[in-house]
Each structure stands twice: as structure tokens, then as C-alpha cells.
Image (cartoon, helix red, strand yellow):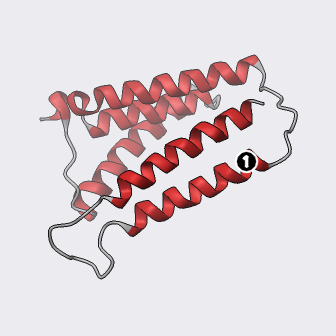
Amino acid sequence: MSDRIFAGLWLLLCIGGLFIGWGIQSEYSYEPLGPRPFPLAILGLMALCAACLLLSRPQVVEWPHRKVMQRLLLLVITLVLYAWGFEWLGFPVATALLTCSIALLFQASLPAAAVSGAIMGVALYYAFDRLLDVTLPLGIWLS
């Protein structure tokens, strides 16, 4: 029953998103199609999947073990903390901490998690800032 409730709510959200997406207008045309088709296509596909889930035969839902749910909760908390501290910690430090904590959630050793976090923070900052020319915050530590 929970999958049908989810599918019904998700279908309503998709329909609302389609109405909002239909109103997207651009002041000038920078592409032949404009900015409207991509969100409408994604929302349309999501609505189709939600309708298929709503109309399918119900299945027995088996919830994951308590330990898996605890790890998922820790992952969500980690991602919220990453979003909260992104600007004042800066991209390299926040990404290093995020990578390290996710590695620890996947049972990596502390030295391996710390090294991979540091490498990912620096490498991703270099890739975005230098190669892709995306401006990212350095935070109060590196400014």
C-alpha cells in the first residue's frame, strides 16, 4: 500500500510541476527549442513511471535492516551538513569531509578515508575551477 501512496503523491507533484514547467518562457531564444522541453520531458517521464507504479499489482514490501536504515539516515545528515557548510568551509574542505564520511559509512579505514577525501576535494576543485571554469567558494580557511 505504501508504494501506491507514494506513487499517487509523486504523480500529483509531477502534474503540478508540468503546469509550472509549461509556463517557462525565455526573453530571448538561445536554442531552437528554448528552455521548456527538458523539464517537461523529465516531469512527463516521472509522471508516466508514477502512473505505472500506481496501476501495477501491489508487492510485498520488505524494509531493510535497522543497520542499513541507520546508515541511510547518517548519509542524509551528512549531505545536509555538506550543504549547510559548503560556503563557509569552502568547496575543497567540505568535499573532503563529505568524501571521508561517506567512505567511513562504507567501512573504509580512517587513513584510507582521509586520504581519499583530501584527494577528491583538491582534484574536484581543480577540475571545476580550472578545467570547467566554474567558480567555487574557497571558504574562510583558504581565502
Residue at figure coordinates x 54%, y 34% from the top left: 112
Extreme bottom residue here?
Answer: 32
Instruction: Establish if 103 lies above or below 68.
Output: below
Q: Nearer the viewer, residue 129 or 9?
A: 9
Q: To which quarter of the image does residue 126 belong?
A: bottom left
Q: Position of residue 31 (x, y in %)?
A: 27, 78
Q: Nearer the viewer, residue 8 or 63?
A: 8
Q: Position of residue 80 (x, y in %)?
A: 41, 26
Residue at figure coordinates x 44%, y 55% from the top left: 18
Residue flagged by tag 1: what amino acid is it? Answer: Leu
Q: Position of residue 55 (x, y in %)?
A: 77, 49
- Say how many tags the image has: 1
Q: To which quarter of the image does residue 131 belong?
A: bottom left
Q: Nearer the viewer, residue 20 or 93?
A: 20
Residue at figure coordinates x 39%, y 35% from the top left: 96
Q: Is residue 95 left or right of residue 128?
A: right
Local packing at callout 1 (Cα closer than 10 Å; few below 14, some 14-19, many 20+) is: some
Instruction: Establish if 79 lies above or below 28.
Output: above
Instruction: Establish if 74 lies above or below 7.
Output: above
Q: Nearer the viewer, residue 131 or 37?
A: 37
Q: Quadrant of the N terminus?
A: top right
Q: Quadrant of the C terminus?
A: top left
Q: To which quarter of the image does residue 64 belong?
A: top right
Residue at figure coordinates x 23%, y 60% from the top left: 130
Q: Position of residue 11 (x, y in %)?
A: 58, 45
Q: Is residue 1 left or right of residue 26?
A: right
User: Which residue is tagged 1?
Assistant: 53
Q: Is residue 58 left or right of residue 74?
A: right
Badge 1 marks a residue whose secondary structure is: helix
Extreme left residue here?
Answer: 143
